[in-house]
Amino acid sequence: MLFLAQLVLTLLLYIAGALAIGMALTPGVLFGWWLWEVISPVGILAEALVISFSIGMGYFIYGVSLMFVVWLMRIVLGLKLEEGYYRPVSLGMLKWMVYNALILLVSTTFMDFMLLTPLINLFYRLMGAKLGKGVQINSKYCADFCLLEIGDNTVIGGHSTVIAHSFERGGLVLKKVRIGKNVTVGLNSVILPGAEIGDGAIIPAGSVLPKNAKLEPRKVWRG
């Protein structure tokens, strides 16, 4: 029974992913089609350049479009995560899986080009994160955006992991992560669910901040 449920869920996720990718690809395809109609026929070299440029430009159009497609799907499907404990094969766990699958779709196919740009902050906000001004994010390994609160001028270093979920007692536990203002989260650090980091604190590179840990303002974490 569990296998069958997992199989059905996997197929539904694939269908949702195909729908999101297809919708996001449409503007880029239309752009390439329009460019081809304008330029063609002008010779094989020019045609090759047009095709190559339209594919390259179409990819970036796809990436930006995908952000908004995923946001729209989140709104339509009512994917808002709430703190709590969720049993397997429950509606809460299903919402969590679909929500993070949409984030993973963007992360896998385009997020490398969004890091340290205004696009990454925009995407976090579209997916429900609360970000202050001047936040710098250089990692695509974060999840559960709508359970993240990050204060002004905080830096999330490269390859850092910030998540608000864990699996305990056979179920899913969701708990907010709160990061204050002017915080530095170093390279390859891990921030686990329920963590609270005070203003001006520092998480050195490679550190692990455990579940429910509280770091006082302007302190340096040792661990």
Image (tube, rainbow, N blue to C red):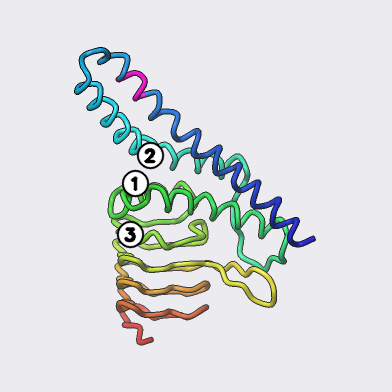
The residue identified by callout 3 is 137
Residue 151 drawn above or below residue 41: below
Nearer the camera: disc 1 or disc 2: 2
Query: Three-letter amino acid code at disc 3?
Result: Ile
Query: Three-letter amino acid code at disc 1?
Result: Leu
Badges 3 and 1: C-beta atoms under 8 Å apart?
A: no
Per the rendering, the mark at residue 64 is 2
Q: Which residues are magenta?
A: 31-35
Residue 223 drawn above or below residue 108: below
Q: Residue at x 40, y 62 (%)?
A: 150
Within the magenta stretch, is there residue 145?
no
Query: Of marks 2 and 3, which one's residue comes earlier in the chain?
Result: 2
Quadrant location of the N terminus in the rendered image:
bottom right
Q: Is residue 112 left or right of residue 209?
A: left
Residue 85 position within the rendered picture, expressed as x and y whole percent measured from the top left: 67, 68
Query: Of marks 3 and 1, which one's residue comes earlier in the chain?
Result: 1
Name the foreground residue: 1 vs 127: 1
Q: Residue at x 38, y 30 (%)?
A: 28
